[in-house]
Image: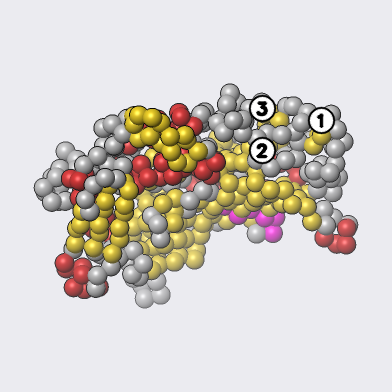
Amino acid sequence: MTVQFLDAASYPTITVEIGFSTVSSGSSTWSTGLWNTADWSGRDVVWTDVSAYVRTISSSRDKNRDVDQFQSGTAQVTFSNIDARFTPANTTGPYASGGVTKIVPRVPIRIRATWASTTYGVFYGRVNSWADSYPGQGKDCVTTINCSDVLADLATVNLAELLVAVGTSEAAGLRISRILNASGWLWGTDLNAGALTTMQGTVYADSALSLVQTTAESDGGAVFADQDGQLVYHDPYWEAGARSTRATTAQIVFGTGVSEVRFTDPQLTYDDTMIFNSATVTRAGGLEQASVDVDSVSLYGTRSISHSGLFCETDVQAALLADFDIFRFADPEYRVASIVVFPASSAAAYWPLILAARVGDLCTVKVPTPAAITITRSVFITGISHTLTSSGGWVVQFGFASAAPWSSVQGGWDTGLWDTVAFFV
């Protein structure tokens, strides 16, 4: 049986589909290390709706603050498997062909939600594992799948070393596009051009994921997979508001007022985990470049961050990246780290906003307190997690990063802000 909410009219229709292989071998793995001529493998797939058997769903995508990078998003789905349709040993079930099961690891999966005739992506990735369990002393059977989004697939593709470096002086967006093309990437992309640096020529010789992440790091940006399976690159101009109004106009106002989205469990923190007031950056073949905020050091002591082996083309650009770290991290911020929303509590108003939310969106969070003080913060979405169960309804948790450092530069960089270099004119 599928997830049954007590008040079904207050919830979107959830659709879970798995891309089973059309061939009798059931295998749906990579062909020759590339993404060949089909989206996920060297074999064609057919999307099969398995929504009727879903019992629970959870998905999560977020940024790792410790390394300032997005990790691969994950999902877990539990299915009713009383008829053994999801059991690999069942070679005569509905997901078998020619006596061979199609229940194999690494098949694609997509999870979508439809509200008011509009369909939104929730998760897009592949199944890493299938696990059967038999509760009630064998009277029931459930199958749980663990999944990762498309960012994880870049780690499986190692690019051979070229004899001659290519791509000298290209911007970050073009470099990422070049890496994806060399990897055989056939999914969608949403890549900002690049903002702060240009790249040295590359001979590859690494995993596609490492090359893409180092390219983003070399430009001060971030790369991640979205809920529709696109690879996204946000360069530093994103937060500055030069790429989209989604970063300059609050997409959701969380609060208790009229037209605001109510929330629970706000987590506010004022800590030292992301204070960095001494930054060093070294590009491949270059000299170490340093930047220090002496006022921050006097207040909090020396807290260091370093980057090495970056692809940026000149030491001047490396110095720019060091200044950029100081700009973002020299001062602590009393920030809203996360909140929890129950969209069904005001379904018509909340669902279109919650399901349309994207990583990188600017939002406003207004936290009321018992002392009659409202703490208001501007934030960027860095994480979105969904949890669906029959008993608990549909819960959405948002993770945030402070937008405070960017308030002085949105609408145009101050050309004297980071030393003598103009970031945006």
* Label annotation for residue 97: 1
* Sequence order check, earlier mark of 3 and 1: 3
Q: Is residue 126 left or right of residue 217?
A: right
* Label annotation for residue 43: 3
Where residue 219 appears, x then y in whole percent? 30, 43
Q: Is residue 80 left or right of residue 344?
A: right
Label 3 packing within 10 angstroms: few (<14), some (14-19), many (20+): many
91 inside magenta stretch = no
Q: Are marks 3 and 1 in contact (CB under 8 Å)?
A: no
| SS assignment at label 2 | loop
Q: Amino acid at mark 1?
A: Ser
Where residue 51 appears, x then y in whole percent? 71, 41
**Residue at the spot x=24%, y=73% of the render?**
301
* Sequence order check, earlier mark of 1 and 2: 1
Question: Which corner quadrant holds the C terminus?
Answer: top left
* Sequence order check, earlier mark of 3 and 2: 3
Furthest-bottom residue in this view = 371
Q: Amino acid at mark 3?
A: Arg
> What kind of secondary structure does the magenta stretch mostly adopt?
strand
Q: CA separation, marks 1 and 2?
A: 15 Å
Q: Which residue is mark 2?
A: 107
* Label annotation for residue 395: none
Q: Is residue 411 left or right of residue 82?
A: left
**Residue at the spot x=69%, y=42% of the render?**
105
**Residue at the spot x=68%, y=52% of the render?**
56
Label 1 packing within 10 angstroms: few (<14), some (14-19), many (20+): some
Residue range in magenta is: 386-391
Q: CA separation, marks 3 and 1?
A: 14 Å
388 inside magenta stretch = yes
